[in-house]
Amino acid sequence: MSGMEKIKEIFETYLMTLVHPFRIHQQFRHQLPLPSQDGHLYRPLTLAEGLGVSWIFVILRGLGKIIIMVAFLNFFMSLQSPEFPFLQDLIRSSSITAYSFLLFSAALDIIFFPIGAIIMTEFWAWVIRTYSGWLNPDQDADTIADQITVHALSSNLFSMIPILGDLIQPILYYFLLYAGIRSNLGATRSLTFIVLITPTLLIGMFLSVMALAIFYLVT
Protein backbone atom coordinates (compact mmCIF):
# COMPACT_ATOMS: atom_id res chain seq x y z
CA MET A 1 0.00 0.00 0.00
CA SER A 2 1.40 3.38 -1.04
CA GLY A 3 1.68 6.37 1.28
CA MET A 4 -1.26 8.19 -0.30
CA GLU A 5 -3.47 5.11 -0.11
CA LYS A 6 -2.63 4.68 3.56
CA ILE A 7 -3.44 8.33 4.29
CA LYS A 8 -6.73 7.95 2.41
CA GLU A 9 -7.55 4.84 4.45
CA ILE A 10 -6.82 6.68 7.71
CA PHE A 11 -9.09 9.60 6.80
CA GLU A 12 -11.85 7.25 5.62
CA THR A 13 -11.88 5.40 8.95
CA TYR A 14 -11.66 8.69 10.85
CA LEU A 15 -14.69 10.10 9.02
CA MET A 16 -16.64 6.83 8.98
CA THR A 17 -16.56 6.88 12.78
CA LEU A 18 -18.67 10.03 12.61
CA VAL A 19 -21.02 8.67 9.95
CA HIS A 20 -21.60 5.24 11.52
CA PRO A 21 -20.33 5.45 15.14
CA PHE A 22 -22.14 2.30 16.29
CA ARG A 23 -21.65 0.17 13.19
CA ILE A 24 -17.94 0.89 12.90
CA HIS A 25 -17.39 -0.50 16.39
CA GLN A 26 -19.58 -3.51 15.61
CA GLN A 27 -17.30 -4.13 12.65
CA PHE A 28 -14.22 -3.89 14.86
CA ARG A 29 -15.68 -6.37 17.33
CA HIS A 30 -17.43 -8.88 15.06
CA GLN A 31 -15.54 -8.33 11.78
CA LEU A 32 -18.79 -7.65 9.95
CA PRO A 33 -18.63 -5.17 7.03
CA LEU A 34 -20.79 -2.07 7.08
CA PRO A 35 -23.84 -1.95 4.77
CA SER A 36 -23.14 -0.87 1.17
CA GLN A 37 -19.39 -1.38 1.63
CA ASP A 38 -19.05 -4.47 -0.60
CA GLY A 39 -17.40 -6.47 2.17
CA HIS A 40 -14.77 -3.81 2.90
CA LEU A 41 -13.48 -3.85 6.48
CA TYR A 42 -12.10 -0.65 7.97
CA ARG A 43 -8.83 -1.01 9.82
CA PRO A 44 -8.90 0.40 13.36
CA LEU A 45 -6.76 3.50 13.77
CA THR A 46 -3.74 3.59 16.02
CA LEU A 47 -3.33 6.33 18.60
CA ALA A 48 -0.69 8.03 16.46
CA GLU A 49 -2.99 8.04 13.42
CA GLY A 50 -6.06 9.31 15.26
CA LEU A 51 -4.01 11.92 17.07
CA GLY A 52 -2.29 13.05 13.88
CA VAL A 53 -5.53 13.65 11.98
CA SER A 54 -7.09 15.39 14.98
CA TRP A 55 -4.05 17.64 15.28
CA ILE A 56 -4.58 18.81 11.70
CA PHE A 57 -8.09 20.00 12.56
CA VAL A 58 -6.87 21.64 15.77
CA ILE A 59 -4.26 23.58 13.77
CA LEU A 60 -6.94 24.66 11.29
CA ARG A 61 -9.13 25.75 14.22
CA GLY A 62 -6.31 27.87 15.63
CA LEU A 63 -5.63 29.49 12.27
CA GLY A 64 -9.36 30.11 11.81
CA LYS A 65 -9.58 31.87 15.16
CA ILE A 66 -6.71 34.16 14.23
CA ILE A 67 -8.20 34.97 10.81
CA ILE A 68 -11.62 35.74 12.29
CA MET A 69 -10.08 37.91 15.01
CA VAL A 70 -7.99 39.89 12.51
CA ALA A 71 -11.00 40.44 10.26
CA PHE A 72 -13.12 41.56 13.22
CA LEU A 73 -10.46 43.99 14.45
CA ASN A 74 -9.96 45.47 10.98
CA PHE A 75 -13.70 45.88 10.55
CA PHE A 76 -14.05 47.47 13.98
CA MET A 77 -11.17 49.87 13.31
CA SER A 78 -12.69 50.92 9.98
CA LEU A 79 -15.81 52.11 11.83
CA GLN A 80 -13.90 54.48 14.10
CA SER A 81 -14.16 58.20 13.50
CA PRO A 82 -10.93 60.09 12.61
CA GLU A 83 -12.18 63.03 14.69
CA PHE A 84 -11.03 61.27 17.87
CA PRO A 85 -7.39 60.27 17.36
CA PHE A 86 -6.86 59.56 21.08
CA LEU A 87 -9.76 57.10 21.05
CA GLN A 88 -8.38 55.50 17.89
CA ASP A 89 -4.95 55.05 19.48
CA LEU A 90 -6.53 53.55 22.60
CA ILE A 91 -8.62 51.12 20.58
CA ARG A 92 -5.64 50.23 18.40
CA SER A 93 -3.53 49.50 21.47
CA SER A 94 -6.29 47.37 22.99
CA SER A 95 -6.74 45.55 19.69
CA ILE A 96 -3.05 44.69 19.52
CA THR A 97 -3.20 43.35 23.08
CA ALA A 98 -6.28 41.25 22.28
CA TYR A 99 -4.67 39.97 19.09
CA SER A 100 -1.48 39.01 20.93
CA PHE A 101 -3.46 37.18 23.59
CA LEU A 102 -5.49 35.30 20.98
CA LEU A 103 -2.35 34.39 19.05
CA PHE A 104 -0.69 33.12 22.21
CA SER A 105 -3.81 31.16 23.19
CA ALA A 106 -4.11 29.56 19.75
CA ALA A 107 -0.42 28.62 19.81
CA LEU A 108 -0.82 26.97 23.22
CA ASP A 109 -3.86 25.02 21.99
CA ILE A 110 -1.91 23.72 19.01
CA ILE A 111 1.28 22.91 20.90
CA PHE A 112 -0.26 21.22 23.94
CA PHE A 113 -3.13 19.44 22.17
CA PRO A 114 -1.24 16.15 21.66
CA ILE A 115 -0.23 16.03 25.33
CA GLY A 116 -3.76 16.71 26.56
CA ALA A 117 -5.28 14.27 24.07
CA ILE A 118 -2.88 11.48 25.08
CA ILE A 119 -3.60 12.02 28.78
CA MET A 120 -7.36 12.03 28.14
CA THR A 121 -7.15 8.96 25.90
CA GLU A 122 -5.03 6.98 28.35
CA PHE A 123 -7.30 7.87 31.26
CA TRP A 124 -10.45 6.75 29.45
CA ALA A 125 -8.66 3.62 28.22
CA TRP A 126 -7.84 2.76 31.83
CA VAL A 127 -11.49 3.26 32.87
CA ILE A 128 -12.79 1.13 29.99
CA ARG A 129 -10.19 -1.60 30.57
CA THR A 130 -11.24 -1.79 34.21
CA TYR A 131 -14.92 -2.24 33.36
CA SER A 132 -14.08 -4.63 30.54
CA GLY A 133 -12.23 -6.87 32.96
CA TRP A 134 -15.30 -6.98 35.21
CA LEU A 135 -17.79 -7.37 32.36
CA ASN A 136 -16.03 -10.10 30.39
CA PRO A 137 -12.51 -11.17 31.41
CA ASP A 138 -12.16 -13.20 28.19
CA GLN A 139 -12.26 -10.09 25.99
CA ASP A 140 -9.11 -8.33 24.81
CA ALA A 141 -9.61 -5.35 27.11
CA ASP A 142 -6.57 -3.43 25.84
CA THR A 143 -7.60 -3.62 22.19
CA ILE A 144 -11.22 -2.68 22.91
CA ALA A 145 -10.25 0.26 25.12
CA ASP A 146 -7.77 1.55 22.54
CA GLN A 147 -10.31 1.32 19.70
CA ILE A 148 -13.00 3.15 21.67
CA THR A 149 -10.79 5.98 22.93
CA VAL A 150 -8.80 6.51 19.73
CA HIS A 151 -11.86 6.74 17.49
CA ALA A 152 -13.55 9.15 19.90
CA LEU A 153 -10.87 11.62 18.77
CA SER A 154 -12.82 11.96 15.51
CA SER A 155 -14.92 14.53 17.36
CA ASN A 156 -12.10 17.03 16.81
CA LEU A 157 -13.29 17.48 13.23
CA PHE A 158 -16.12 19.67 14.56
CA SER A 159 -13.74 21.83 16.59
CA MET A 160 -13.13 23.80 13.39
CA ILE A 161 -16.65 25.26 13.51
CA PRO A 162 -16.35 28.88 14.71
CA ILE A 163 -17.77 29.57 18.19
CA LEU A 164 -20.04 26.49 18.32
CA GLY A 165 -17.19 24.07 17.69
CA ASP A 166 -15.90 24.33 21.26
CA LEU A 167 -19.36 23.30 22.48
CA ILE A 168 -20.06 20.57 19.92
CA GLN A 169 -16.69 18.81 20.15
CA PRO A 170 -16.81 17.66 23.81
CA ILE A 171 -20.46 16.60 23.49
CA LEU A 172 -19.63 14.56 20.39
CA TYR A 173 -16.56 13.11 22.13
CA TYR A 174 -18.72 11.66 24.90
CA PHE A 175 -21.25 10.43 22.35
CA LEU A 176 -18.52 8.55 20.46
CA LEU A 177 -17.32 7.05 23.74
CA TYR A 178 -20.92 5.98 24.39
CA ALA A 179 -21.20 4.40 20.94
CA GLY A 180 -17.93 2.53 21.40
CA ILE A 181 -18.76 1.25 24.87
CA ARG A 182 -22.18 0.07 23.69
CA SER A 183 -21.12 -1.55 20.40
CA ASN A 184 -17.52 -2.59 20.99
CA LEU A 185 -17.49 -3.40 24.68
CA GLY A 186 -21.08 -4.70 24.55
CA ALA A 187 -22.23 -2.87 27.66
CA THR A 188 -25.87 -2.12 28.45
CA ARG A 189 -27.18 1.44 28.41
CA SER A 190 -27.15 1.71 32.19
CA LEU A 191 -23.60 0.36 32.50
CA THR A 192 -22.45 2.68 29.72
CA PHE A 193 -23.75 5.71 31.61
CA ILE A 194 -22.02 4.47 34.75
CA VAL A 195 -18.74 4.20 32.83
CA LEU A 196 -19.14 7.73 31.48
CA ILE A 197 -19.81 9.27 34.90
CA THR A 198 -16.92 7.41 36.52
CA PRO A 199 -14.49 10.38 36.17
CA THR A 200 -17.02 12.64 37.88
CA LEU A 201 -17.41 10.14 40.71
CA LEU A 202 -13.64 9.77 41.10
CA ILE A 203 -13.14 13.54 41.18
CA GLY A 204 -15.96 13.89 43.71
CA MET A 205 -14.44 11.21 45.92
CA PHE A 206 -11.01 12.83 45.69
CA LEU A 207 -12.38 16.27 46.59
CA SER A 208 -14.34 14.77 49.49
CA VAL A 209 -11.23 13.10 50.88
CA MET A 210 -9.26 16.33 50.50
CA ALA A 211 -12.03 18.32 52.22
CA LEU A 212 -12.11 15.85 55.12
CA ALA A 213 -8.33 15.96 55.43
CA ILE A 214 -8.31 19.77 55.52
CA PHE A 215 -11.17 19.75 58.03
CA TYR A 216 -9.27 17.48 60.42
CA LEU A 217 -6.08 19.49 59.99
CA VAL A 218 -7.70 22.81 60.91
CA THR A 219 -9.79 21.49 63.80
Image: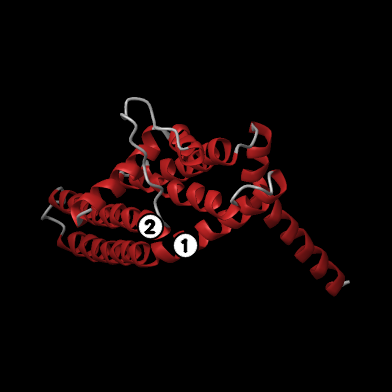
Q: For label 2, count other residues whose C-alpha is less than 10 Å away and answer few (under 14), some (14-19) or many (20+).
A: many
Measured as percent of width and height from the top left, residue 70 is found at 20, 55
Residue 204 in sight? yes
Residue ID for mark 2: 51
Residue at image point 13% right, 50% down: 78
In front here: 20 or 35?
A: 35
Residue ID for mark 1: 118
Measured as percent of width and height from the top left, residue 188 is found at 65, 33
Residue at image point 37% right, 33% down: 19
**Element type where label 1 sits in the image:** helix
Q: Is residue 89 left or right of residue 161?
A: left
Residue at image point 35% right, 45% down: 14
Position of 123 relative to 79 (above/below):
below
Image marks 2 and 1: residues in contact by CB distance under 8 Å: yes
Q: Amino acid at mark 1?
A: Ile
Residue at image point 31% right, 66% down: 107
Q: Quadrant of residue 62?
A: bottom left
In front here: 143 or 77?
A: 143
Q: Earlier in the sequence, mark 2 or mark 1?
A: 2
Measured as percent of width and height from the top left, residue 160 is found at 30, 47
Measured as percent of width and height from the top left, residue 125 is found at 56, 55
Report, in whole angstroms, how far the alpha carbon at label 2 lies from the one at label 1.
8 Å
Q: Quadrant of residue 192?
A: top right
Q: Quadrant of the C terminus?
A: bottom right
